[in-house]
Amino acid sequence: MDAQFWIGFFNIIILDLVLSGDNAVVIGMAARKLPQNQRKKAIVWGTAAAVFLRVSLTLIAVWLLEVPLLKGIGGILLLWIAIQLLTDDDGEADIHTGEGLRSAIKTIIVADVVMSLDNVLAVAGAAHGNFWLVLFGLALSIPILMWGSKLVASIMNRFPWLVYVGAGILAYTAGQLIVEDPIIHARIIRQMEILTWLIPVVLIVFVMIIGRSRRSKTSSP
């Protein structure tokens, strides 16, 4: 138990709290309009999918780092998910059927694929190759995802306007993925450092405008 182990240990706790929080927001937002019994199923299946994906991605993390524009593509996909979750807020069709549950789980899984990548790479880096620390990071993410998702879903049902906050968090995360992509950072961001924070902020505004516009169209007679 040397100093590097304990530094990695505490870094992983902080990283899991920050990065798993984004996943919890996605799961909570996707499940919030489901009936109580289906909401529990969506959260359980969503959490299980997130953990499975993290284990799988951890095994191929080194290879994933070599895939060109992976983070940039993931950021664009996450942006689309943020808009969809914001747009679907007023949709009540099929919400009491199995289709509503399947749709929520599909949304959660797609978002988990994108967002788990950041968590896996961050935890793997903080662990410095220590298998037990990586395992600890994966195990710690389970209660954060489970309890965090339930809390987000409950709060958003009580305060519907918070759906915009959730969408904003996802948009900001998407922006971070894009600017942190090695190719984009080397060719664009490095030349204009202001884009490091400007792109995430612009994407938040973009999601709010598009989401609000699409919700207005769907709610109008």
Image (cartoon, grey):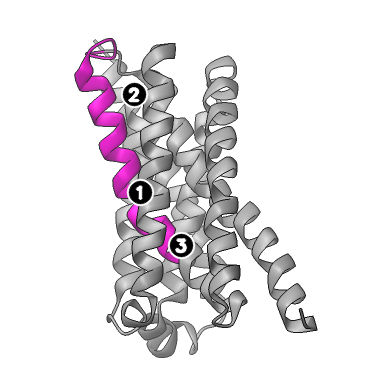
Q: Nearer the viewer, mark 2 or mark 1?
A: 1
Point 44% across, 55% down: residue = 203
Percent position (x, y) of residue 20?
A: 55, 51
Q: Amino acid at mark 3?
A: Gly
What is the quadrant of residue 84 in the picture? top left
Residue 202 or residue 186, whichever sits in front: 186
Percent position (x, y) of residue 28?
A: 48, 32
Earlier residue among tags 2 and 1: 1
> Is 117 colored magenta in this rendering?
yes
Left or right, residue 214 beside residue 89: left
Residue 2 or residue 9, whichever sits in front: 2
Q: Residues within 10 Å of mark 1 (few under 14, many from 20)?
A: many
Q: Amino acid at mark 1?
A: Ala
Q: Quickly name the residue at label 1.
A: 111
Left or right, residue 170 beside residue 109: right
Residue 158 or residue 135, whichever sits in front: 135
Placement of the C terminus among the 4 image quadrants: top left
Q: Is residue 96 above or below residue 179?
A: above
Q: Secondary structure at mark 1?
A: helix
Q: Residues within 10 Å of mark 3 (few under 14, many from 20)?
A: many
Q: Quickly name the residue at label 3.
A: 175
Earlier residue among tags 2 and 3: 3
Percent position (x, y) of residue 119?
A: 50, 62
What is the quadrant of residue 161 in the picture? top right
Please tell me the numbered disc located at residue 216: 2
Earlier residue among tags 1 and 3: 1
Point 60% across, 23% down: residue = 155
Q: Amino acid at mark 2?
A: Ser
